[in-house]
Image (cartoon, rainbow, N blue to C red):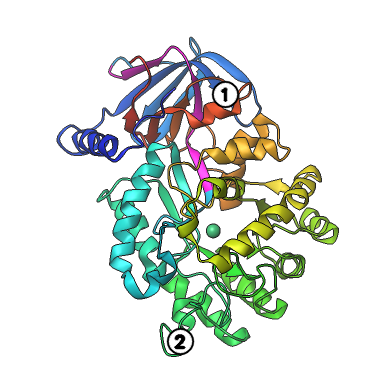
């Protein structure tokens, strides 16, 4: 089965549809969606012959046919097959970034304005793949904040974006720009690079001042940067604690990038809300996560995609780290998931092609979640991680009208999540390319 609208030509067609829908021909005030199957992600219950009534950007009513009143003026959209779900949520994207040859020199070759435009292209692809909300974890020059605002204003199409602006990193860490001679792209707290508690706090305040809605802290080194080992702890625990306390004072959550066990444990103890990657999780780390209720965003699809990534996409030193970490992490991540830590879906798209975010659902099942749990990780659970569980993540009256229809039954075949044929965000239909329609 084809996955519609992933080609650039397809996007152009869809842009035209969207422009028609949003400007010259505004969407009807009330839409009724009739679906043969609706999977209630909160319970796993399948409702046959479901009806969802959408008024402007909200869900007005949802239930089995006969229990829901459909207003006479409603525009009706029928789905005699497939499964209706809430809009999908990706807790870890890099919309303003693509891995392509030479990307590691991007900071001296690509302006923030160009990154934002790159992000506009990737945001459209992501939305049409079924993701109606994403958390974007890192961008240069506030490009993701600009992109989030452009989507909100209707200048470009894309998911609802929770941006983090610059990632926070100590000097020489994975958020700093390594690999250049001294004097080239030297960064300070405004660009997220900070040493010591005081500078770390200033870095948090500056990102929030300019629009960050989540803070990302690099607790350990990374694979896509030039530090010697990917797993080594970067910020000290007291620096991470200061970052978390400051972010939380502003009501902003903290995502901690962490590969190695020391950095993982320090980030959890210091109060990070989610752990990104969690590649080499120790038993102590797992116990701490369960104790503190820290989310794990294991970003599995990007590792899976490495086998399809052209050799010239990374410098040799990075490939070495990617391959050794890639082998080591499988057992650790499976162990953490089996232990029952809270898991939310995050694809890390951007480090592999945008629009393939849905692969993460299947990958989560390969690492131990049931298909229903995987669907929940990318809907209701991700909404909880973002603190948006009263707005998005389920099909329920009062919630934002974010809906998708996938071809098949994802509980029987999780790869149905990769076949999205209908996307509505905030009551606006962005694609209705259902096979056979
Ligand atoms: Zn990432």
Left or right? Give the position of 297 relative to 60: right
Look at the picture and state if 90 lies above or below 30: below
Q: Nearer the viewer, mark 2 or mark 1?
A: 2
Residue under the point 41% across and 29% down: 3
Residue 194 found in image quarter: bottom right
The image quadrant where one finds the C terminus is: top left
Q: Which residue, given by chain and number where applicable, does mark 1 sit on?
A: 39
Q: Position of residue 22 (x, y in %)?
A: 23, 38
- Disc 2 and disc 1: Cα gap in Å? 55 Å
The kind of secondary structure element at disc 1 is: strand
Q: Position of residue 170 (x, y in %)?
A: 58, 80
**Circle 1 Cα neighbour tier, 10 Å, few/some/many (<14 / 14–19 / ≥20):** many
**Circle 2 Cα neighbour tier, 10 Å, few/some/many (<14 / 14–19 / ≥20):** few
Left or right? Give the position of 297 relative to 428: right
Residue under the point 54% across and 69% down: 250
The image quadrant where one finds the N terminus is: top left
Look at the picture and state if 411 lies above or below 311: above
Q: Which residue, given by chain and number where applicable, does mark 2 sit on?
A: 181
Magenta stretch, residue numbers = 73-90
Q: Nearer the viewer, residue 184 or 212?
A: 184
Picture mark count = 2
Residue under the point 51% across and 77% down: 176
Instruction: Please say whether residue 82 is one of the residues in the magenta stretch.
Output: yes
Label 1 beta carbon within 8 A of ligand 1: no
Look at the magenta stretch and give its main secondary structure: strand
């Amino acid at each position: 089965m084809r996955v519609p609208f992933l080609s650039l030509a397809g996007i152009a067609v869809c842009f035209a549809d969207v422009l028609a829908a949003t400007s010259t021909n505004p969407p009807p005030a009330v839409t009724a969606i009739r679906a043969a199957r609706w999977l209630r992600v909160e319970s796993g219950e399948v409702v046959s012959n479901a009806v969802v009534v959408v008024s402007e950007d909200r869900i007005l009513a949802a239930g089995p046919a006969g229990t829901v009143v459909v207003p006479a003026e409603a525009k009706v959209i029928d789905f005699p097959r497939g499964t209706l779900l809430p809009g999908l949520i990706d807790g870890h994207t890099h919309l303003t970034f693509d891995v392509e040859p030479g990307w590691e020199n991007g900071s001296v070759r690509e302006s923030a304005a160009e990154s934002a435009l790159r992000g506009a292209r990737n945001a459209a692809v992501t939305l049409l793949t079924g993701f109606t909300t994403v958390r974007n974890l890192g961008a240069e020059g506030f490009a993701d904040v600009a992109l989030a605002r452009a989507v909100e204003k209707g200048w470009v199409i894309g998911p609802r974006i929770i941006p983090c602006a610059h990632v926070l990193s100590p000097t020489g860490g994975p958020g700093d720009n390594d690999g250049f001679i001294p004097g080239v792209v030297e960064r300070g707290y405004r660009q997220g690079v900070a040493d010591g508690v005081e500078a770390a706090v200033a870095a948090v305040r500056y990102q929030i001042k300019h629009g960050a809605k989540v803070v990302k802290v690099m607790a350990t080194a990374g694979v896509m940067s030039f530090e010697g080992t990917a797993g080594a702890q970067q910020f000290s625990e007291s620096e991470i604690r200061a970052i978390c306390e400051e972010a939380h004072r502003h009501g902003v959550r903290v995502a901690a990038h962490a590969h190695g066990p020391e950095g993982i444990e320090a980030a959890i103890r210091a109060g990070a809300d989610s752990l990104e990657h969690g590649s080499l999780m120790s038993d102590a780390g797992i116990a701490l996560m369960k104790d503190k209720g820290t989310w794990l965003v294991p970003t599995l699809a990007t590792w899976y995609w490495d086998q399809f990534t052209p050799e010239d996409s990374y410098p040799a030193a990075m490939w070495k780290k990617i391959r050794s970490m890639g082998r080591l992490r499988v057992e650790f991540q499976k162990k953490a998931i089996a232990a029952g830590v809270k898991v939310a879906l995050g694809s890390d798209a951007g480090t592999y092609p945008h629009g393939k975010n849905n692969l993460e659902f299947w990958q989560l099942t390969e690492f131990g979640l049931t298909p229903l749990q995987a669907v929940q990780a990318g809907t209701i659970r991700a909404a909880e991680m973002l603190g948006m569980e009263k707005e998005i993540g389920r099909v329920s009256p009062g919630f934002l009208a974010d809906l998708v229809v996938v071809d098949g039954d994802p509980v029987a075949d999780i790869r149905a999540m990769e076949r999205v044929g209908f996307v509505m965000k905030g009551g606006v239909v962005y694609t209705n390319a259902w096979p056979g329609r």
